[in-house]
Image: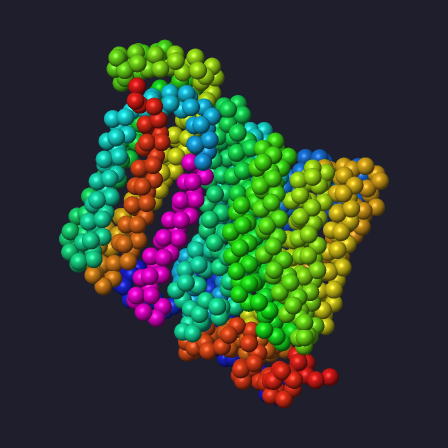
Amino acid sequence: MHRTGALYGQFKTLEQQKDTASLGMWIFLVTEVMFFGGIMLAYTINRHTYFHAFAMGSNTLSLTLGGFNTVVLLASSFTMAMGVWSAQVGKKDLLKMFLSLTILLGFVFFGVKYVEYAQKFHHHLVPGKSFDITYCVNNPSKCEDIGAEELEVERKEVDAAMQADPDLNAHAQLYYSAYFGMTGLHALHMVIGAGLLFWLLKNSFAGIYTPEWNTPVDIVGLYWHFVDIVWIFLFPLLYLIDRHK
Amino acid sequence: MAVTPKFPEKHYLNQTYGIRSWLLTTDHKRIALLYLVSVTFFFFVGGFFAMMIRLHLLTPDGYLLSADTYNKMFTMHGVAMIFFFLIPSIPAIFGNFLIPLMIGAKDLAFPKINLLSWYIYIVGGSLTLYAMVTGGLDTGWTFYTPLSTVYSNSAVAPAVVGIFITGFSSILTGLNFLVTVHTMRAPGMTWFRLPLFVWAHYATSVVMILGTPVVAITLALAGMERLFGLGFFNPAMGGDPILFQHLFWFYSHPAVYIMILPAMGVISELIPTFARKKLFGYHFVAAASLAIAVIGFLVWTHHMFLTGQSTYAALAFSFLTFLVAIPSAVKTFNWTATLFGGSISFDTPMLYAFGFLGLFLIGGLTGLFLGCLGTDIHIHDTYFVVAHFHYIMVGGAVMGYLGGMHFWWPKITGRMYPEWLARIAAFILFVGFNLTFFPQFVLGYLGMPRRYHVYPPEFQVYNVMSTAGASILAVGYLLPMIYLTWAAFYGKVAGDNPWPATGLEWKTPSPPPTENFEVTPVVTWEAYDFHNRPDLGLDEPTGHPAGGGVVPAHGHD
């Protein structure tokens, strides 16, 4: 089934058709803002109530991996924007290249996210019965991926946080609920975005996007940028709560 | 009408044949009929649960059901009726069918997404049905945590997933309507010439767009809590069950307006048509729809006055609750003012419109009892609340739904329903409804709590009245289903504009052709203007002292 850029029956002009599609996408993004808004509200309230647990939880994340992924996503936004531009000016080979690069960067992000998630499982930081915020501090041999110095810092932080919040282990689970809930939903959106990008790539090999008609590239681009922006919020909210020490 | 109307040879119903042509259709009119069938199915599912509740409450000790089963019955009644009947009913059936016709478009902006939204509804509905038959659901339709996330032993997970999925059907429908109204209007169809039905759906769509994603994330979080042990609403981890209630009502109160606004849109069509008069205060009624949509988002904690929230917050929300009554009152006054000096006819759709006016008035005013902090403490969580929202939802939304059904059935099927039978059914419904729910106001005021499976013996007489009313009500629902189905095949041929009414949907054959209009119409008249419309054949230049009049609905007596 090819979308050839022909005028669909319900429209009168191509311009009306394009306006309609992008208005639809913008309204969809409004719904996405409301969707992420709900979980961000839950995050905000809990962070306010259990600040020490949230700060502690945040400090157990890897700033290196999170920072690297932020750069990767920003780069993918750049390649996506270049892809949209390529489609608009009719540079079909560039379009294929930029779409492929965007997909590649998306998969780099997934790879890093996989490493991060796996670490959290190994470190007993998944909400549930075996959750233990002090696990690495008490079992350094099981957490060899964390350096000795780093672990020493973490020990002091845990001790201080325990002083401030005796129920730290319960409340830190709320932080990790937010972490997995928010990054999980974000990753789900990226998976959908990657699927859409593959679809665009397939169509761009068929050469159907022209300067006159490239609406799908345009609106998938909007979606991809939105998903990036969500991460731009998630990164400081989750990784940078109390890093100034 | 002197000329006998002819049934068109080619129309959307016989354009193509076969099951595939229905299941893969992108025609908004056929999708509306797909919704009609599935929504009706869920209405009877929900109705079955309602009958079980009423039968059980015939006796104070409740011989019919166990306490657990009773919990499941009222939960599943609420879930089926709210998420699968009331929310999609008027928008997905009449909105789908009529919005393109009313604005002179060939289809909605995104026909494939429209079909997709029906499939999403079916998938979500199937999952919820699966939950209903494999363990049921006993949390109340509100899914309050931690009952739903930790303690309930019923099939919460599939139900939550099903409702989560169905939410996207609602989001996509709202999105489609918003974009369609913005970009697909025919030449001359300016914003202030739009029928108020379209304005009401525009406001409804805004609520769907802004509210539904919030309940989606709320149910997603509750679902993840049940399935994967996340803890936002779990007190054991320091999570807050009240947060769930805030998030839930942030959608579910505006959702009430998703249910009632479209019905108000229907009433705004019926009253001018059967009073032969321009709607009084068009701009105010249009603005009132938007005002309801906006203020409706700011009243949600009036469901939570007794959760221990701050008194100042409660005061503010009580004030806002009173404020949202104003646009509803504006509409009610304008509908009533339209009747003044009109030449009114009592066709079935108009009977439903009158029913709506009276019942919505009672439902709306009793809402103020509940929005008032002092009285709410007394009647909170009693049958008074149950009666109040049934007066809005059944007396308002369902009356609007059935009124619209009779009004547009000739357009949808090309055939008239049997008028006298329909009037009798409308009457039965009105009597049955009041007998069912009015005693519940009394019960609630006397202190009978909702959701209990037993009650003190002195309340029995009211409960018996209510159950008797429910069985009359059931007859009132079954009758239209039977004669409307009959009429779709054997009714009298209706013609393009049997009433006649002023909307663009009546300027195309009944049933309409697949492309809606052979030539894109150009609109040169204002909404509900019965004068200056020679095509309606109603002008009577010398009839009225103020100038031109229009012929009354059934001619001069």
Picture coordinates of residue A126 (x, y %)? 40, 24
Q: Is residue B326 above or below residue A13?
A: above
Horizontal arrangement in the rendering, residue B541 relative to residue A43 (left or right): right
Asked if B110 appears above or below B156 in the picture, the reply is: below
Question: How far across and how far down the image is residue B388, in percent?
Answer: 69, 49
Q: Which residues are magenta?
A: A11-40
Residue B181, quarter of the rendered image: bottom left
Q: How many marks?
A: 0
Q: Is residue B310 in view?
A: yes
Choose between B12 and A15: the one closer to the eye. A15
Q: Is residue B555 left or right of residue A21?
A: right
Q: Is residue A195 visible?
A: no
Residue B186, given in percent of the width and then of the height, sits at 42, 72
Figure colour scheme: rainbow
Q: Residue at x 52, y 68 (%)?
A: B195
Residue A22 within the magenta-colored segment of the rendering: yes
Task: Kindly identify the residue that appears in the image at 29 percent across and 24 percent down.
Answer: A62
